Amino acid sequence: MNSKVASGPHDPANQRAVYVFEAPVRLWHWLHAFSFAALAVTGYLIANPLPSLAGEASDHFLMGDIRLIHFISAYVFAIGFAVRVYWALVGNRYAREIFYLPFWRPSWWKGLFYEIGFYLFLTRRQHKMLGHNPLAQAAMFFLNTLVTIFMIGTGFALYSEGLGIDSWADRMFGWVIPLIGDSEGVHDWHNLGMWVMLTFVIIHIYMAVRADIIGRESSVSTIIGGWRMFKDDQP
Amino acid sequence: MGIQQTFYEAMREHGITRRSFLKFCSLTAAGLGMGPEFAGKIAHALETKPRTPVIWLHGLECTCCTESFIRSAHPLAADVILSMISLDYDDTIMAAAGYQAEEILDQTIAKYDGNFILACEGNPPLNEDGMYCIQAGKPYVEKLRRMADHCKAIIAWGSCASWGCVQAAHPNPTRATPIHKVITDKPVIKVPGCPPIAEVMTGVITYMLTFDRFPELDRQGRPKMFYSQRLHDKCYRRPHFDAGQFVERFDDEGARKGYCLYKMGCKGPTTHNACSTVEWNGGLSWPVKSGHGCLGCAEDNFWDRGSFYSSVTNLNVTGQVEATADKVGGILAGAAAIGVAAHAAASVVSHTKDSNKGGAQQ
Ligand code: HEM
Ligand code: HEM
Ligand code: SF4
Ligand code: SF4
């Protein structure tokens, strides 16, 4: 896909629908979203466990199951992200957007301030976008991509303590613990990472639904079906 | 005290019988988790190797490491080991005092330059040129640097020497600094804990004296044989953790039944030490066994994390931020939710206005 951003009302590129998010990107988005939801709920319950259960210890495995769901979702989350990184290399240009910020382009900064103005109600007219708008791109890069890497790094470092010293996880991620300082610190930052990502998700879902309702182009259906549809022919 | 005297000869001189000596060798092999054939190897090494002197220095500390050390479970081990090391220098337990004591340091350097082990209990304060810890009229840090220059290797006893511990807690007015940050050109082994377990201390020192090298260390310089696992990995209350059975208050049913102490702030899940396996006072008990959570004494920063009784602790940003991840994060996410709600309301208003005007398409 090499569609360009529409440059005028009669530009052939100014079509009504453009294929933006390829199947792997869409599939990853929903795997990412659902595994995050599972990780956040189970993670919160690991830090703040449910009320104590009565009876014999051998009758229950509640905390064990919560941790198991956390770890299974963690594998989905991490492997999904790895495949997504691969897809950024081979996919279309929109597949790369969440992995870098074109801060060297003045037009990107212009677009960023334009969007900020738009969301502050200073400008009424939104630019048409095929991929992410610069503000969304910045949010995705800082609050999603970087935090995802951070959560995988700290998560597998904690996981390595359970697998044991000299395990594969210890060899690959164990260095994170002395980097942050100590195990308790890694827990705390891992926990804070969850809240940062949750903050992103709250704003993200709001923006997506808002764009669908009052924006000029399709949004939620784009991340489901891949096609970006425009509601008007104006530039 | 000729340079050729072996460990074995030194022990015999101190009245240790051959029988006790051999017992000690098998005890040590077992304590280090090595097979029975190692008892012979230890015995052979101690019989043939010239004794390596140990100089034991004390900086800012509470002497709990020494107290722990001399209470090694097996009185035999304590006897034997003390006969191996007390010969030289340890402020707390040596007979010499004053100039006589300080002279020993000079003699050791003269005789055993590059061949003695420096065991450090406590750490040096660096502020005001080290004036917060003066020994024999000089800042401790000078004595430490001088002895470190001539030693072969350093043992950092306890959390003070390894991490800084309570005297380095925020705001650390004396700038108490762990050994590895002051001495950077000598190998340092960390044996953290406040204090470390006696058997761990004797195990480490015996290993070093017999095999002339450090046991295998982890990334942070701790001997793997004692610090590679968390207390939580070997805790006998772990089945209650996995089941989801927690003590919620120190006087509840769960406390009586011996449930997991996680909700009472037990730091077992983040603390690397041997308490849950070796235990304390000769295997008598350890904190969790007596009904109280682990404080995390063997870990860096354990003093600066706020309450010992909460499972989510303070984020440690140079010891200043007194906030837990749950608190900071809750505020962040809460602010986002409020912001989103306000923005949604404003959007509806502005959108309705625009549509009424039939103006700018959105
Ligand atoms: C019901 C929940 C969600 C909805 C309706 C939703 C909707 C969307 C939409 C419409 C887009 C496309 C944005 C655009 O057109 O510029 C998108 C992209 C994205 N969303 Fe979501 N999202 C949801 C949950 C999540 C969650 C939970 C996360 C992260 C934890 C997330 C992370 C992302 C990321 C990283 C992208 C960029 C995709 C890419 O370019 O590769 N989303 N989402
Ligand atoms: C967005 C993704 C993730 C979120 C939101 C999340 C959330 C959390 C939270 C809140 C905790 C409790 C921290 C505490 O003890 O204070 C936790 C613990 C943990 N997480 Fe994650 N996590 C994520 C990803 C991962 C990944 C990728 C792994 C890798 C295996 C992982 C492994 C762990 C482990 C091992 C623990 C400690 C469990 C225990 O103490 O029993 N997490 N997580
Ligand atoms: S008491 Fe502490 S160390 Fe034992 S299982 Fe519970 S949290 Fe882990
Ligand atoms: S149980 Fe925890 S606080 Fe107590 S001695 Fe062991 S490591 Fe230190």
Image (tube, helix red, strand yellow):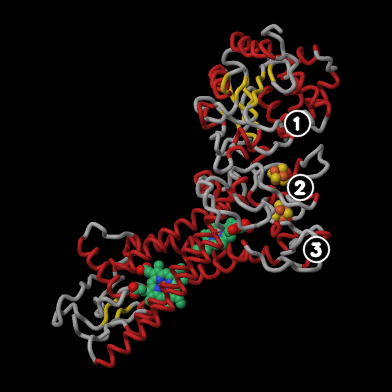
Specify the quadrant of the image occupied by residue B45.
top right
- Mark 2 residue type: Pro
Disc 3 is attached to a residue of which chain? B
Please provide percent x and percent y for residue A148.
45, 60
Q: Amino acid at mark 3?
A: Asp
Relative depth, front residue between B301 and A99: B301
Left or right for A37, reference B36:
left
Residue that carries the numbered disc 2 in the rendered image: B287
Local SS, label 1: helix
Label 2 CA crowd tier, 10 Å (few <14, some 14–19, many 20+) = some
In which image quadrant can residue A110 be found? bottom left
Task: Kindly tell me whether residue A190 is visible in this rendering.
Answer: yes
**Closer to us: A214 or A170:** A214
Residue under pointer 3 = B252
**Mark 1, residue position:** B67
Locate the C terminus of chain B and report the quarter of the image it occupies. bottom left
Callout 1, which amino acid? Glu
**Ligand 2 is found in which quarter of the picture?**
bottom right
Which mark is nearer the camera, 1 or 2? 1
A220 to the left or right of B116: left
N-terminal label among 1 and 3: 1
> Which residue is depicted at the point 24% across and 80% down?
A125
What chain does badge 2 belong to? Answer: B
- For label 3, count other residues whose C-alpha is less than 10 Å away and answer few (under 14), some (14-19) or many (20+): few
Q: Earlier in the sequence, mark 3 or mark 2?
A: 3
